[in-house]
Image (cartoon, coloured by chain):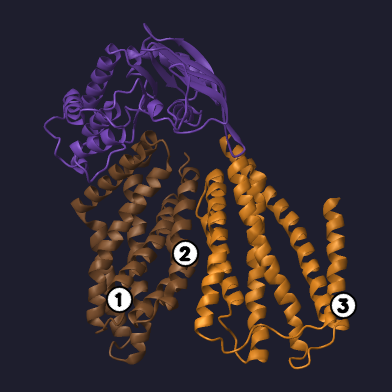
Amino acid sequence: MFNKILGWLTFIITMTALYLVFMWVPNERIMGPVQKIFYFHVSSAWIGFFAFLVVFIAGLAYLFTRDNKWDTIGVSSAQIGVMFTTIVLITGPIWAKPSWNTWWTWDPRLTTTLVLWFLYLAYLMIRSSIHEEEKKARFSAIFGIIAFIDVPIVWFSIRWWRTIHPVVVDSSGFAMSPKMFTTLMVSLLAFTFLYFYLLTNTMKLEKMRAEVAGLKERLRNS
Amino acid sequence: MNYLNQIRTLVWKDLTSELRTKEMLSSMLIFAFLTTVVFSFAFDPDSETVKKVFPGIIWVAFIFAGILGLNRSFLSEKSNDCIMGLMLCTTDRGIIYLGKMISNLIFMYIMEAVTLPILFVLFDYRLKGSLLYLILIVALGTWGFIAIGTFLSALAVNTRNSEILLPIILFPLIVPLLIAAVQATGVILGGGVWADWSNWLRILTAFAVIFTVVPWLLFDYLLEV
Amino acid sequence: MLTAQNITKTIGTKTILHNIDLHIKEGEFITVFGPNGAGKSTLLKILSLLMKPSTGTLTINGSSANQESSKTRSQIGVISHQSFLYDNLTAYENLEFYGRMYQVDNLRDRIYDVLKEVGLEYSLNDPVRNFSRGMLQRLAIARATLHQPAILFLDEPYTGLDQQAIDILNSVLRNLNIKDRTVFMITHNFEQGLDLSDRVLIIKKGRLAYEGAAPGLTPGQMKEIYLNTVGGLTP
């Protein structure tokens, strides 16, 4: 029931966001239609970071409570995080090429997202190299905590690094009109709803997977 | 007091064991030396641009050799289940982490003390800044690297493909450390002023302290049986 | 001397031990049998403070067992089928290491004493790497008794031993018992150690399934009790 309502809400808000992005908001003067990717790019980046925060909190909660629910939340959130950071890393160059005439810039935000992407992959790699369910949950919770603590240090070091080597293009963006701001806010909201919808469904999938594994074990033992 | 005694005993055990075979130390040394030589072939040591990437070469050589050592550092605890013996006699399992970290740090410092002069000779590099500051940065950067590396090697050794896993989970985490260490080393080698590298020193210190304290607190969860 | 009350251990979604109650008297030798995966090792790990129980309490010598107390820890010794010894160190160095970790007084004399007890006084400067399985196990006994623990846990100590090593292990265990030492052993082996035991337990699916006195019991009788209890499974 809850899932159904969440699904419909997500659908409605996403449709609204799409309408705002493609029909309502005017094109940016210099960059033109390609600038519209910005709404997806920023929203995906927000979800990428948010999902990482959830992995961190779920990790702490797992270590304290030892409730498998938290592990399921952690791994589901990490999987969604990988997806959204991948979207950021793909949409970033698509946007950068026409506006700055380069595919990639070592901009702090983009670079931190890249590091984040690697950290998520490391998290999933740890899970895939451990068989025992309990150890898998414990180790990935520990890594989720360590990795999250690392992110602010990554951010500061990259920012200081770039101030020494002046950035060729100014990535601070452009003046946003009120309409653009509204569109961005609705897009952020839509992606947040999408995140929670995906999270509940991924968790269901993970639970089923655990159940199947449990049944297989019982079959093998009987 | 008991705490310090136990840490000292753990370090003594690691050093005695390593000095008997010198397996880990010698492979680290040879690997660092080899990396240096490979770099000299890959980048012409006489060209001016190579002088600019010299700090990077130093740190890549150190970190690669370090990974080699870290991959081995918990193997001796795993064979014969020695880690169980340690868990039986320590009241706080964080001690096991601190002891291992200090041992690894000593091995790294030995390797670096030998490799650094070789690097300077092979690349014909003349130090313009203070040697003392350079040692400070190398010592601090290595500490941060070994602090997080020792923890993750304890994690990786309990998985199926530990030797591949360790670099994959360690490299993204040490991005800030690598940036700060390379930048600070570059400034000091070029004779830059304190203001130019104080920020990097701050990052290195923060990294080393944070990633000593957090793993020390989390080690108990890592070692559960 | 050791009392476990209502010990339950849950790992993930599986419950390994269900409400185990156990009282071990001073000087008692308890032997535990049970099929693989019954929870024997988990129980041993909990009693020897390697693992925390999910629920339940543990008291050693009247005081609540605290993992953080070095005093409690030094009352426990463990002999496993793994030796817990460092291959690159000599026999003496291994004992010196553990002795310093436990802060044993007069360590030098104590090391010579335990080495003599297990008959390794002439191999003290050999690296453990060159030791045979039997010698390794004898040194493991020395390691576990070095700090004079009040209770000794044996985790399948006969695994992989030749007859000579078994004899030495048995004679060491027999001598331990005279000194009023408490022993808790888990094993698969009906032939060995039964004559030393005071009490026999059988664990099945995480619960205590059988408890009985050991003296007078022959290995054959024990095997029959075992098969009746666990339902025909071989250990």
Marker disc for residue A19: 3
Apparent side of residue A4 relative to residue C106 in the rendered image (left or right): right
Residue located 26% across and 83% down the image? B126
Q: Residues within 10 Å of mark 3 (few under 14, many from 20)?
A: few
Circles 3 and 2 on the same chain: no
Marker disc for residue B168: 2
* Spatial CA span between label 3 and label 1: 62 Å
Instruction: Report if residue A54 is visible in the image.
Output: yes
Judging depth in this view, the residue of A106 and C45 nearest the camera is A106
- Give the SS element for disc 1: loop
**Looking at the picture, how far across and down is residue C116, in whole percent?**
16, 25
Write down the chain letter for disc 1. B
Chain B is which colour? brown
Instruction: Report if residue A121 is visible in the image.
Output: no
**Looking at the picture, how far across and down is residue B187, in whole percent?**
39, 79
Residue at mark 1: B130
Q: The residue under label 1 is which amino acid type?
A: Ser
- Dot 1 or dot 2: first in sequence order is 1
